[in-house]
Image: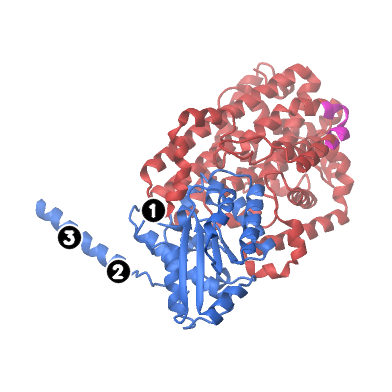
Amino acid sequence: MKAIVGLTALALMLMAVPASAEDPPHASCEVPAYLLTTESKLPKVAEAIKTDQKLDILVIGSRSATIGAPDGTGFPGRMEAALREKLPSVTVNVTLQLQVKKTAEDVAKEFDQLLAGKKPTLVIWQTGTVDAMRSVDPDDFRTAVDEGVAALQKTGAEVVLMNLQYSPRMETMITTTPYIDAMRVAAQDREVPLFDRFAIMHLWNETGRFDLFSAARGLEMAKRVHDCLGRSLATFVIDAAHLKPAEPGTQR
Amino acid sequence: MRGSDSSERYDMTSVTDQAAGASAGNAAKQGIPSAAVPSRTVPERSSAVPAAGSDRELRLDLFRGLALWLIFVDHLPPNIFTWLTIRNYGFSDATEIFIFISGYTAAFVYGRAMRDRGMVVATARILKRVWQIYVAHVFLFTIFLAEISYVATSFENPLYTEEMGILDFLKQPDVTIVQALLLKFRPVNMDVLPLYIVLMLFLPAIIWLMRRKPDLTLGLSVAIYAVVWQFDINLPAYPSGVWFFNPFAWQLLFVFGAWCALGGAKRMAPLLSSRITLAISIAYLVASFFITLTWHFPQLGHFVPRIVEQWMYPINKTDLDVLRFAHFLALAAVAVYFLPRGWAGLKSPWLRPAILCGQHSLEIFCIGVFLAFAGHFILAEYAGGPWIHFVISISGIVIMSAAAWVFSWYKRVAAKSGTDAKSADANADLAGGGS
């Protein structure tokens, strides 16, 4: 009996190992080009890269900018790695300011403090989840994002907005559409690029690239999702800045 | 919710019987507006079709049934079927259809009750109906609580730690459940019934005034809608925010449905049969289809001038955006133009399931919400993937249709045993709900 259990366990382990190994973090992230291009431009980012060989990015995010794992595994860290890979001659610096359990309006009030003493070329503002969970009035949310972006632009930084995660299990509990729409409108009004995290993750789930319904408690999938998000975000920023990546066609 | 309670038969099931009976030719005799839906062909058709009891206003049933199916599909996670729902092809969606037809049928039946039995009795019946809807809502909330309590204890994907925070309300059931009973806490997908409850509460006043000054009533409704937009009035929700479907805005559709039922449809018939109306409607539908396309294919967004975008967005569902309302009107105008009253397809067995569902709308709506919860649960706990999705959507529609068939069967049987004794009073029995 013991032997059978032992052998079964061994067999399961052997099956498990290649399964995770055949899906290395660098596997294609399968994001169609239209989700990684934008009409809005980032001229200052392009300028900083070309003339200063230096790019400072500040990510202002909520809890979903991390996965509760060691540093560098969330999408900000992965984006930094991807940008360094694509722009080898440029000093890329990405810092993350977590603003947990705060609505867009709350976060916008903190901007002065968050940016104190820093001069980021680019601020990536990931928001919307907390507002959706608290059912903040979508109009108020849109105003908060709109004014928040304006405040960030006033500091001289360029802004990229990033919307909510797609989480199929939470669909019965969180209404996301009005907040996604509001962010699209705010991005259009202020002419800033919007990184459509929701659409990208939705597509991954639909094509089977990632099974986001999965109840897995492990970190593996979360890490791979964030790796892909970080890479896609890097591609998106480079596209918006109208730069040619060092190795064209490497990786989306 | 289902039972031998006859007032229910009276409303959701017999409403349409009644509507049908009246339009079969005795409407004039009874001195009430016929059930004629806006239709260019009403006059000719109703005389062309033999006046039989089987000549019901099936179009209302059909569209309400379809709306119920679409609401069910829209409540499931997006899948292939979602592409069939009208919200992907224009501004409005199934909710508009549902609320309009509910206003139409409710005004028709209770308007009749008010004429026959007076204000007090009609009001009492409406309130009884409100109570039934409320109980249905609380029942669905209980199922919802059961589902998410389970999810809260079994789901720990680190990717979604933040979103899981929404379940924190389970930690304070004292507040949450009371707020749910007050209709202030309404989880996703549970917004339609509270809206319906509030609209029905105002129905006695609406009908009372509508029977005297129909145009004034509609005018008041438009005025309230305008005031709501001007001053941003809505009911508060818990834990924050406002009602997802603002009843003060959505009343416009409900009252418009009532206005059509109590004579407005007849007056609009010439307008609706005009080719110009048709052309405008189709042009609007096409334009809105194109705008919707740009949501799914952002590449097309370049073709929309920025000034149009700035004027148009956001298209507000909470306050029933005027673009949505207009889209519904255009849809209705086109539907009425191409599907005349006596359209033969209405008798087709293929449409039978949808018609049956439309005839039992409260029950089928609740079953649909329940099935959507169950579908989510199956997808989350057992299996995902497009194939299972497809099976769940189809099974849901089959279950809804089967349930509707059982309700119809039961109603027929109950009616047979009931009307033997007092068939002479059958009409009053239907209209009044009997006992």
Compare residues B353 and A87 and report the one nearer the observer.
Answer: A87
- Rendered view: B199 above or below B432: below
- Rendered view: B236 above or below A86: above
Q: Which chain is blue?
A: A
Q: Quadrant of residue B131?
A: top right
The label shown at residue B158 is 1
In the rendered structure, the residue with mark 2 lies on which chain?
A
A93 vs A1, left or right, is: right
Q: Are marks 2 and 1 in contact (CB under 8 Å)?
A: no
Give the residue number, with chain letter if any, for mark 3.
A10
Q: Is B211 colored magenta in this rendering?
A: yes
For the question of whether residue B223 can be seen, the reply is yes
- Rendered view: A109 above or below A77: above
A13 vs B175, left or right, is: left
Give the residue number, with chain letter if any, for mark 2.
A21
Label 3 amino acid? Leu
Callout in the foreground (2, 3): 2
In the rendered structure, the residue with mark 3 lies on which chain?
A
Compare residues A67 and A12 and report the one nearer the observer.
Answer: A67
Q: Secondary structure at mark 3?
A: helix
Give the magenta-colored segment's residue range. Answer: B209-219
Q: Are marks 2 and 1 on the same chain?
A: no
Q: Position of residue B141 (x, y in %)?
A: 52, 34
Q: Quadrant of residue B2?
A: top right
